[in-house]
Amino acid sequence: MNVQLSTGGELFEPRRPGSKDIAWCPGCGNFGIRNILISALAELGLKPSEVAIISGIGQAAKMPHYINANGYHTLHGRAIPIATGVKASNPELTVIAEGGDGDMYAEGGNHLLHAIRRNPDITVLIHDNQVYGLTKGQASPTTMKGMKTPTQPWGVFEEPFNPVALAVALDASFVARTFMGYFKESVEVIKQAIRHRGLAIVDILHPCVSFNKVNTYAWYREHTYWMDDHDPHDREAAFRRALESDPLPLGVFYINEKPSFEEEVPAYRWDKTPLWQREPKLNLVERFFETKS
Amino acid sequence: MAEFRGDVSIVLGGAAGQGIQTVEEILTHALKRSGYHVYANKGYMSRVRGGINTTEIRVSSKPVRAFVKRIDILVPFKQGVLSWVENRLSETTVVLGERENVEETFLDKVNLVEVPLTKMALETGSQLYLNTTAAGLIVGLFHGDFEAVEEHIRKRFESKGENVVKKNIEAAKKGYDLGVKLCEEGTIAVDVQRDEKAAGDVLLTGTEAVGIGALAGGMNFLSFYPMSPSTGVSTFAAQKAEEFEIVVEQVEDEISAINMALGAWYAGARAMVSTSGGGFALMSEALSLAGMAENPVVIHLAQRPGPATGLPTRTMQGDLNLVLYAGHGDFPRIILTPGSLEEAFYLTAEAFNLADRYQVPVIILTDQYFVDTYYNLPAPDVSKVMFERHIVEAKPGYRRYELTEDGISPRAIPGYGEEVVIANGNEHDEWGDITEDAELTIKMQEKRAVKKLETIKRNAPLPKLIGKENAEYLVVSWGSTFHVVEEALEKLGSEKVAHLHFSWVYPLNPETKKFFEGRKVIVVENNVTGQFADLLWKELGVKADHRVLKYDGRPFSVEEVLDALKGVVE
Ligand SMILES: Cc1ncc(C[n+]2csc(CCOP(=O)(O)OP(=O)(O)O)c2C)c(N)n1
Ligand code: SF4
Ligand SMILES: [Mg+2]
């Protein structure tokens, strides 16, 4: 079975009128990712009001409409900075940045690089279908060499982007890859990513049944394997695994515990109150004027 | 003998890195402390070393807040300064300094009062003391309080150790004594009355007024990418971040800066970005997202001349059209243009309430001249700053984009209340989910671009009128040109002319039109086309009879505005 129903996630099933008309193609891997995410959130014991899903633009980025959680469907490529702002303003929220491979690796690529450096405690879920779905089949940064598309009729010649190797190279805090066809394992990886303190990147492979005729469900099963004997605290090993391309390793590549952005900023050193509950510090403003006379 | 009464304009000129800023700082602070009104503004080159930077300092018995072209005392710290400011020199200008800093060609033309600053500094122990010697000299000319000089030097050099403090005080004293002597000998006569009130005033820059205003308005998040002349506000916030316990982050680009700020507001923070024209241009897609998602945000834009990189350290009011029209699609925004430091403080604080109330981008538009200007003013009354919070609890059934009469939907934030909050940059239904429904699209377009805009307009404050309501001429200013027009009109002293200043330039309250009826309108702007004059025409059908424009990258001087007005009204 390619797409499994979510487990125990009733709370996260949306009841809004606009969440019924789903814009994904029948059979698309996005359904599976939705169910995996709902299951992970439910199993972590979270409530919808405690979770904020910030998405970019693309088919993947429509997720906030098909789930019952706080959501912000933003701009192409900008989910990461927006999610960073959300988390830094209210560290009590579980914040997820979500988008496609075009969204996160092309239009938003620069933000990804710097988010790795900044290390906000957010989970970045990349629905990696190795193609642009919403705009109808152009190549994405992860499209395999040689694939012909309407805008690369001669076949893609650019080297595909390797998000896992990139993240390990930048010493990211948490790096994983999964294929949504493996339901239980994916739920576990995503739970681990959400629980991880610091930036957690999960590249989620999924078929686009409409525009990617190469990377099908069967293809992913044939061309991936789970890393059973890998130590995610070993960066060099992680990097070696990251460079493997056929079959593609799945699982957690790398974990690097380090302080998160919210732990570093002066806002929460002494006071953990979310910013929205704070008031202007007018006594300090007064004091400033005293020093200026 | 050179004689200056009431109001003296001193210009310091030197290379970048030579430390004229130290001179300026010591002498403005000491003179203010002594009870003189002071004003200062710098004209700097976009370089870290060399070139010619100048600072104008006005010392007066009355409040002074505007740039004058006239130079009474010029202190050159290198050759080339006189040529650089040649068109500002007159027969009465005194050049105070060392002969080798004056170009040959000027030697027989100017009124040079030689002071051996280098020699005096060396006597104290090192060339390093030249700046404090010069500062002491000028304070001496005014017979300012030497204790005030001492106090400032102590504050400034404290971290470098007692010996440095002592040596600098010694150097300043040598300069001071010489200044007093020049007056006693009758070489220079300076007659400026003290005003006790000035001594208790605060001395603020435009940058500080915006920065502290933001903190007073509850700013607790600032994301930025450095760009002159806006960086000062971000630096100020970073310096205050630990004390005020806020988030200040330098990010990868302006796109990230504004998107982070949008996320922060979505989660209930009060966020601001500070940038200049080029950075703002990069923010325009997110500005449009703020419009669609009804996401509040506060943007400080310090203008410099464009297009493109333009003149990075100079001034212009050339980005009004940019902020008016940036962002695809129709959505309202508010544009504030403080004219005084008091306004910069109160308006920046208020910007956060406005953004919160109307859920729109609020842009504080300043410029290089404004942020780099400083003068003394009574400390703003902090108790006048109102803190309004417009956040509601997300109760079951909450709809983020509920359709309302005034176009404003109560704004909830994630984590406050049981219900979830869905914001969306796609066209949406009342809950925030995507829609392509034609009827709903019409309703949402009208909600944002008509109803909400009308609500803002109705509540928009009117411009400030100074002078007679039925004056024949109306001189219009906006933003940083306020004080220069104010002083020019004082000098003109004509009952026929009134002054109308806009600190809120968009959207305009329709009642604004009444100020213009039957008046001849003169619009003063620091740009090449008259962008605000065009806006008056577009919004109110008001035609500017005269446009007084300046666009050489420098601020207007009082003399220039006065001459231009004389040309029109006389
Ligand atoms: C600034 C901007 N450029 C381009 C687009 C058009 N666009 C929307 S989604 C997309 C790519 C979608 O691909 P991906 O991110 O992989 O998402 P998918 O649809 O495959 O899930 C593009 C190019 C846009 N919305 N905004
Ligand atoms: S276009 Fe592709 S990725 Fe998008 S919904 Fe359809 S199958 Fe899924
Ligand atoms: Mg894709």
Image (cartoon, rainbow, N blue to C red):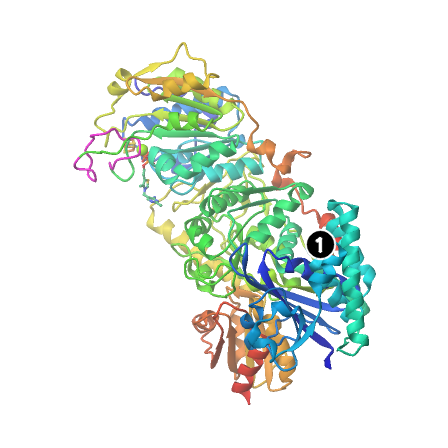
Q: Position of residue A119 (x, y in %)?
A: 51, 31
Residue B459, can we see it?
Answer: no
Q: Position of residue B508 (x, y in %)?
A: 51, 67
Q: Quadrant of residue A30?
A: top left
Residue A79, can we see it?
Answer: yes
Asked if the stretch drawn in magenta spans residue B284, the answer is no
Asked if the stretch drawn in magenta spans residue A141, the answer is yes
The quarter of the image holding the C terminus of chain B is bottom right
Q: The magenta stretch spans which residues?
A: A137-154
Residue closest to the eye, A272 or B331 = A272
Q: Is residue B172 left or right of residue A113?
A: right
The quarter of the image holding the N terminus of chain B is bottom right
Q: Amino acid at mark 1?
A: Ser
Q: Is residue B60 left or right of residue B395?
A: right
Q: Position of residue B403 (x, y in %)?
A: 47, 50
Q: Does the Cβ of the disc 1 residue fall within 8 Å of ligand 1? A: no
Position of residue B510 relative to residue A79, above or below, is below
Residue closest to the eye, B538 or B251 = B251
Q: Secondary structure at mark 1?
A: loop
Specify the subunit that label 1 lies on.
B
Residue closest to the eye, B232 or A181 = B232
Q: Look at mark 1 in the image and give the residue it sits on.
A: B126
Q: Residue at x 30, y 29 (%)?
A: A129
Q: How many circles with numbers are drawn on the protein?
A: 1
Position of residue B119 relative to residue B157, above or below, is below
Q: Residue at x 43, y 25 (%)?
A: A168
Q: Residue at x 61, y 41 (%)?
A: A276
Q: Position of residue A85 (x, y in %)?
A: 52, 39
Residue closest to the eye, B134 or A218 = B134
Q: Quadrant of ligand 1?
A: top left
Q: Residue at x 64, y 37 (%)?
A: A266
Q: Residue furthest top?
A: A229
